[in-house]
Amino acid sequence: MINNPVLRVIAKIMIPLILLFALYVQFHGDYGPGGGFQAGVIFAAALVLYAMVFGIEAAERVIPAKVLKVLIATGVLIYGGVGVYTLLLGSDFLDYNTLAHDPVHGQHLGIFLVELGVGITVAAVMISIFLAFAGRGARR
Amino acid sequence: MSDPILIALFAMMILIALAAIRLSDLFAVVIMFSIYSLLAASMFVQMDAVDVAFTEAAVGAGISTILMLATLVLTGRFEKPSTHKSLLPLTVVGLTGAVLVYGTLDMPLFGDPNSSVNLHVADRYLEQSSTEIGIPNVVTSILASYRGYDTFGELTVIFTAGIGVMALLGIGVRGRRK
């Protein structure tokens, strides 16, 4: 598959578009359908496509396992961190009203951060599950 | 449930499910599951649940198909011919299915404004979301703000799944670079 020029060219054209679409879904989720879960999966799909066409090793050079492990935890920490931060500001856990000068802005910021956390963890988990499975297949 | 598009989609889903049972080529079965998810996603679109449809299309038809194919590489492509009798399992499945269908007879109709789900907090969310949260997509405001705890729980589930796979299979550490 690696030597197939059609796949390589098409993948090179598609991957940036898929990544861009993932970012759009991530940050436009407040206004249209989408959000962290969908964006994370689409982002992961781009890297899965990369790993399928260019090989697992190439994909691991793009996003090393160490980075993935950190990213998996980072998303949950962002989400939980927003919750703890709102606690420290004196409101309830994950009550975003106090995050900014007025409640609506606080809600915007809170949702943005929380969705970012969701997106990071979902993308990293999906990529690492794929690499774990496909990596075993490649080693045989 | 008189929408012809929904009925057609349901009929296709049943056909796909039957085909998935009949086939012994697991590669074809995985593709059948993918089509099944795509049909489910179309059904959610028809029911105006675009966010759910989006997730179903991305996760069900996309990533999980890839993961099942990656598993097939490890396990082998063809099902072993079954040696057990199918009468007892068929009876159990048939009975369970009949009980489930009987259970749905009590359920409120799709979109019934008087069902208990729609009488609880749904109105409040729909009416207050634009002033309290101020973003147009109510689904996002419910998911990330009103029901923030639940989404945190969901994220933790995914986190745990990732940790579990890493603990069992490991990634990028040993073996690959000889």
Image (cartoon, coloured by chain):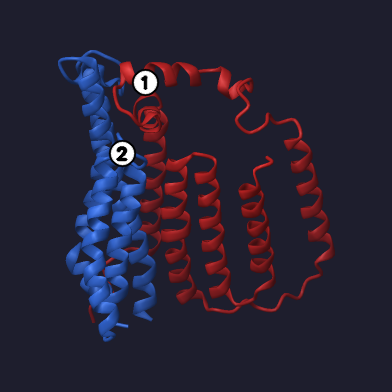
Residue A119, given in percent of the width and then of the height, sits at 29, 45
Identify the residue at horizontal 37%, vertical 60% (top origin): A129
Q: Residue furthest front?
A: B4
Quadrant assignment, res B50: top left
Q: In the orientation shown, which residue stands out farthest toward the left?
A: A101
For the residue pair B111 and B76, the one nearer the viewer reads as: B111
Q: Tell me the quarter of the picture where residue A80 sits.
A: top left
Marks 2/1 in contact by CB < 8 Å: the verdict is no
Q: Is residue A101 above or below residue A83?
A: above
Other-residue count near label 2 (Cα within 10 Å), few / some / many at <14 / 14–19 / ≥20 = many
Measured Cα–Cα span from mark 2 to mark 1: 15 Å
The amino acid at mark 1 is: Ser
Q: Nearer the viewer, residue B27 or B174?
A: B27
- Residue B151 appears in view: yes
- Picture quarter with the N terminus of chain A: bottom left
Q: What residue is disc 2 on? A: A29
The residue that appears at 70% across and 79% down in the rendered structure is B81
Tag 2 subunit: A
Residue B136 appears at what percent x and percent y? Answer: 33, 29
- Identify which residue, B74 or B136, lies in the foreground: B136
User: Which residue is rendered at x = 34% and y = 26% of the image?
Assistant: B145
Relative to B89, A42 lies left or right:
left
Label 1 marks a residue whose chain is: B
- The chain coloured red is B
Q: Colour of chain A?
A: blue
Residue A82 percent location from the top left of the image: 24, 29
Q: Disc 1 designates what residue?
A: B129
Q: Is A50 situated above or below B92? A: below
